[in-house]
Amino acid sequence: MRGMVGAAVLCLGSPFALAGEEKSLEQIQADYQEYLYASYEGGRMPEADRLMDFVMAAYEQVDAAEDAEQAVAALHLVMEMSSKAEGGMVADWQDAADRLSNEYVDEPSLALVIDSLGYVPPALEGPRDEFLEMVAAETTNDEVRAAVCMGTAKRILREDLMGGCDEKDAAQLPGLLDKLAADFGEVEDPYGRGNFATMASRMKYEWENLRVGSQVPDLAGVDGDGVPFKLSDYAGKVIFLDFWAHW
């Protein structure tokens, strides 16, 4: 597969051709992000041929990687870029996923890849689930195992928020969160958001208290005049809550 794609890219004239300037993975990612933002700002979907240029450049970094962490980072970028084409570049995404599950299943940085797979285009949902099942069955690394468990729980929560998850998933979630806390509670999240026991506790609170149809937890604050109030003070009235932030 990669050989055929590589030939096509050379015929098209890749900006990362062998005769051209060799770029680091960081520079490839920066160029890709710049192209992606420019496409969206112009009201266009990223073009598959252009994305393939970036995919092949990232694959060159996989082959040149000096250690497993670098290879995983490059394959992660391949998966991300492959998911951005309209309809998804399924074969290229699958190729990267296969290499990760076959060659790097115990590499701790694989947890970062798994954490990013909460949402994929519909065409990649099946391959994503197969990839996670394979990793869960083969890995012996606690960070990776915890990431798979967390990823499944986050997917169920997200589906429930977006319109409801099926009954099987709903029944599965409490046990997943208990397992996450019991088996991997002291393991640190790969993005530094705390350990998995803390994250499981937060997700369990959200599931039990913040779903559509749940009773809203009592909130406390101060009004514009500095007078304390509680949400329960307005019981029986229509309440509009406006949550906002800025950066």
Image: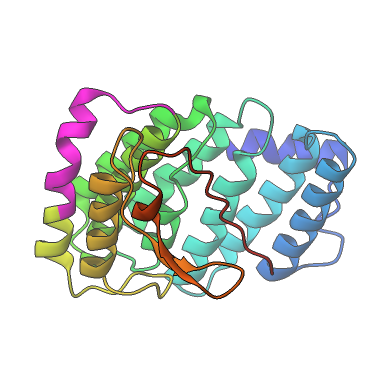
Secondary structure mainly formed by the magenta segment: helix
**Residue at image x 29%, y 39%?**
214
Name the foreground residue: 40 vs 73.
40
Name the foreground residue: 141 vs 99.
141
- Percent across and percent down for residue 1 are 57, 34
Q: Is residue 247 visible?
A: yes
Assess whether residue 48 is covered by the magenta stretch: no
- Percent across and percent down for residue 91 are 54, 31
Quadrant in the picture for residue 11: top right
**Residue at image x 43%, y 62%?**
112
Q: Is residue 69 left or right of residue 151?
A: right
Quadrant in the picture for residue 43: top right
Q: Which residues are magenta?
A: 163-177
Quadrant in the picture for residue 144: bottom left
**Residue at image x 43%, y 70%?**
191
Image quadrant containing the C terminus? bottom right
- Percent across and percent down for residue 228 are 45, 71
Name the foreground residue: 12 vs 164.
164
- Percent across and percent down for residue 152 are 29, 44
Assess whether residue 166 is covered by the magenta stretch: yes
Q: Is residue 135 visible?
A: no
Name the foreground residue: 244 vs 227.
227
Tell me: residue 225, above or below residue 146: below
